[in-house]
Amino acid sequence: MENNPKNSRREFIRKGSRISLLLTLGAVGGFSARNITHEKYVWQIDPFKCTQCGRCATSCVMTPSAVKCLHAYDLCGYCDLCGGYLKPDPNKLSTAAENQLCPTSAIQRKYIEEPYFEYVINEDLCIGCAKCVKGCTSFGNGSLHLQIIHRICLNCNECSIARLCPSDAISRVRASKPYLVKGSFTNDAKG
């Protein structure tokens, strides 16, 4: 077999072109991979879509639920007859436990001055049942709403609450903007 210089040169150029193409693609891929940010995503409830169905309390894999009530103090009227605190019964103007909406007494009422009261959510007692949110939305200005507390949430790959949410109010968002809230609130949800 005779060694043909033309075939060797062609083969050399063909192999060289392949190698340079692979090196170029590798460099472009490496540069692109270096510029990709591996931003974390978290689950969030859109308070404007939430229908207060109560599934957040029962469908979360955490017990109690990682969903808690938040209070947008800037929106609150600090009413004596808070729709999120008391059951809607005009005949009973008592703040006795049996007249309160929250089944776990997670909302604490603090006197400010006549006729104003401040309502504070005790996160440890809140189970995310949304009864107070529904009352506040129905008979008030909607200053109470639900949100997933990320320091409690396991951030499951597929959120069991999101799967069952009838209003499709739960979605994945960038961790840099984790909370969509009504107004601005001072509750320590970002911890």
Image: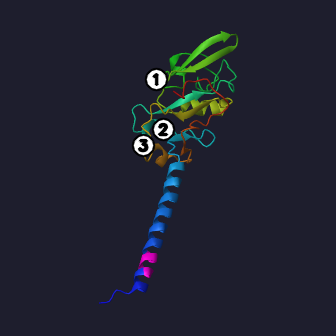
How dense is the environment of label 3, judged by Cα within 10 Å: few (below 14), some, or many (20 and up)? few
Instruction: Identify which residue, 161 or 114, lies in the foreground.
Output: 161
Q: Amino acid at mark 2?
A: Cys
Q: Position of residue 37 (x, y in %)?
A: 53, 46
How dense is the environment of label 1, judged by Cα within 10 Å: few (below 14), some, or many (20 and up)? some
Residue drawn 47% across the image and 48% down it? 163
Q: Position of residue 188 (x, y in %)?
A: 55, 24
* Left or right of 32 in this view: 76: right
Q: Secondary structure at mark 1?
A: loop
Q: Secondary structure at mark 2?
A: helix
Instruction: Identify which residue, 119 or 184, lies in the foreground.
Output: 184
Which residue bears the numbered disc 3? 156
Which residue bears the numbered disc 1? 125
Instruction: Identify which residue, 130 or 181, lies in the foreground.
Output: 181
Which residue bears the numbered disc 2? 56
Q: CA distance from mark 1 to mark 3?
A: 23 Å
**Magenta extent:** 9-14
